[in-house]
Image (cartoon, grey):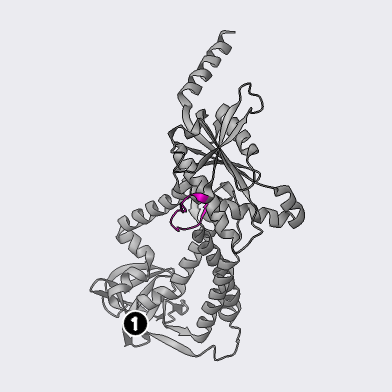
């Protein structure tokens, strides 16, 4: 079968190209079955999540790569056995520190072996992986075992290595020598305190994107409801902040940069394998803020529910009035007259800063800022004419920040704190 032979040769060629010298590290929780049986599935799962959150950053900071988790075991690869042993000592020391406050934290055993293996993007295959797993099986609680081949580049005295004995891995004919690292005698090798990291799987990435979307929508809502009125209460900032669409139309480069930034963030999330745990906590807190704020905001503002406690007292009023266009398409004129030339047409919903008011017979005109140093006039109400009913063109109002708004934010902050500290995430 020529085609099968060609396929076989292609596979051989691929394997030779991907075969590299690596050091494999396996960790395993000792007596994990007993822990799960005595504590239950939920506590057992939380225990695995706790250990992974501690082990993953240490492996990363020692130039290691998390290959996969198998139950309560972790498989990692390193380019150097030095980094693998350094990470192993740091892991055992970190767990020892944690047991000072919680003696019930399970003990783990670690096995290390070096050799050639087929290194692919998502996994590593070969005899080296199998032998490393067998070595880890031989290790006792709190023990680090390392093969003779892996210690060739190591200084035995520096790492307090002692000969453990010889054993024949299952499936092998020749015995191999194992060494034990007496990590209790080693100097402190814990990495500098840094942000706790979490491993990202597909579920976690979708959770980040979903929570980020919720937080983004909430920020947009707060901007349109509150922030822009505080910031745009001056002619210097009104044109930019009152109508983001106006900013995009006049400064397209800003829109392009924001779009690229958003795409970059999404791409970074998709490509990342780890992320600081505080990011999850902040996003979780943001979701809590959003839910709490909206649940309180809806009845108190949209439904005008009086919660008492002086909720209608005004804490801040804007210096200017803001003119909202209520007609489908309103014309802004040079002078306060329906016969004056039209400067610009503006769409419904656009906000403009009021700078003056003029009364012309039945007409009331609002002078508004339409461009830097440029003003125009828009009527408030078009008086009724023959066969034409009265029509609302624009509406001028001040912005008021009341006590009930403070209550909304306080409830939202409580929701943020709850979401931040009650953070829950399924580990990858």
In this rendering, position of residue 155 left or right of residue 292: left
Number of numbered discs: 1
Measuring 63% from the left and 33% from the top, which residue is drawn there?
Answer: 134
* Residues in magenta, as a range: 185-199
Measuring 46% from the left and 39% from the top, which residue is drawn there?
Answer: 156
**Chief SS of the magenta region:** loop
Pointer 1: residues within 10 angstroms few (<14), some, or many (20+)?
many
Q: Is residue 307 above or below residue 256?
A: below
Extreme residue toward the left, this view: 373
In this rendering, position of residue 61 left or right of residue 180: left
Residue under numbered circle 1: 365
Residue 348 visible in the shown view: yes
In front of the other: 161 or 151: 161
**Spot occupied by residue 342 in the image (x, y as percentages of width and height):** 29, 70
Q: Is residue 191 magenta?
A: yes
Q: Quadrant of residue 304?
A: bottom right
**Spot occupied by residue 190 in the image (x, y as percentages of width and height):** 47, 53
**Spot occupied by residue 22 in the image (x, y as percentages of width and height):** 48, 32
């Amino acid at each position: 079968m020529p085609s099968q032979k060609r396929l076989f040769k292609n596979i051989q060629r691929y394997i030779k190209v991907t075969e590299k010298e690596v050091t494999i590290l396996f960790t395993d929780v000792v007596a994990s079955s007993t822990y799960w049986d005595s504590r239950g599935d939920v506590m057992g799962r939380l225990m695995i999540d706790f250990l992974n959150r501690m082990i993953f950053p240490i492996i990363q900071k020692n130039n290691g790569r998390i290959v996969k988790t198998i139950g309560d075991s972790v498989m990692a690869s390193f380019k150097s056995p030095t980094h693998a042993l350094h990470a192993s000592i740091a892991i055992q020391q970190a767990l020892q520190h944690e047991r000072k406050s919680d003696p019930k934290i399970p003990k783990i055993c670690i096995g290390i072996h070096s050799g050639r293996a087929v290194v692919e993007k998502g996994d590593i295959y070969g005899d080296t992986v199998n032998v490393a797993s067998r070595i880890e099986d031989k290790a006792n609680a709190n023990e680090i075992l390392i093969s003779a081949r892996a210690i060739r580049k190591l200084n035995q005295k520096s790492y307090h290595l002692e000969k453990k004995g010889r054993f024949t891995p299952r499936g092998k004919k020749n015995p191999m020598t194992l060494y034990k690292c007496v990590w209790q005698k080693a100097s402190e090798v814990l990495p500098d305190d840094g942000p706790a990291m979490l491993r990202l799987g597909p579920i976690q990435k979708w959770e980040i994107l979903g929570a980020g979307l919720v937080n983004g929508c909430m920020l947009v809502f707060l901007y349109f409801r509150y922030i822009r009125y505080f910031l745009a209460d001056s002619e210097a900032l009104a044109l930019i902040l009152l109508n983001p669409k106006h900013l995009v139309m006049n400064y397209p480069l800003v829109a392009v940069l924001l779009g690229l930034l958003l795409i970059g963030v999404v791409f970074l999330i998709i490509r990342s394998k780890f992320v600081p745990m505080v990011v999850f906590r902040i996003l979780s807190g943001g979701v809590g803020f959003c839910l709490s704020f909206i649940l309180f905001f809806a009845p108190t503002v949209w439904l005008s529910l009086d919660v008492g406690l002086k909720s209608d007292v005004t804490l801040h009023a804007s210096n200017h009035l803001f003119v909202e266009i209520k007609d489908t398409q309103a014309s802004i004129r040079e002078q306060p007259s329906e016969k004056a030339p039209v400067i610009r047409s503006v769409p419904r919903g656009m906000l403009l800063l009021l700078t003056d008011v003029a009364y012309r017979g039945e007409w009331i005109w609002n002078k508004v800022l339409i461009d830097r140093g440029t003003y125009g006039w828009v009527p408030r109400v078009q008086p009724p004419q023959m066969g034409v009913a009265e029509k609302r063109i624009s509406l001028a109002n001040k912005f008021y920040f009341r006590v009930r708004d403070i209550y909304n934010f306080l409830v939202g902050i409580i929701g943020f704190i709850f979401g931040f500290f009650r953070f829950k995430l399924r580990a990858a």
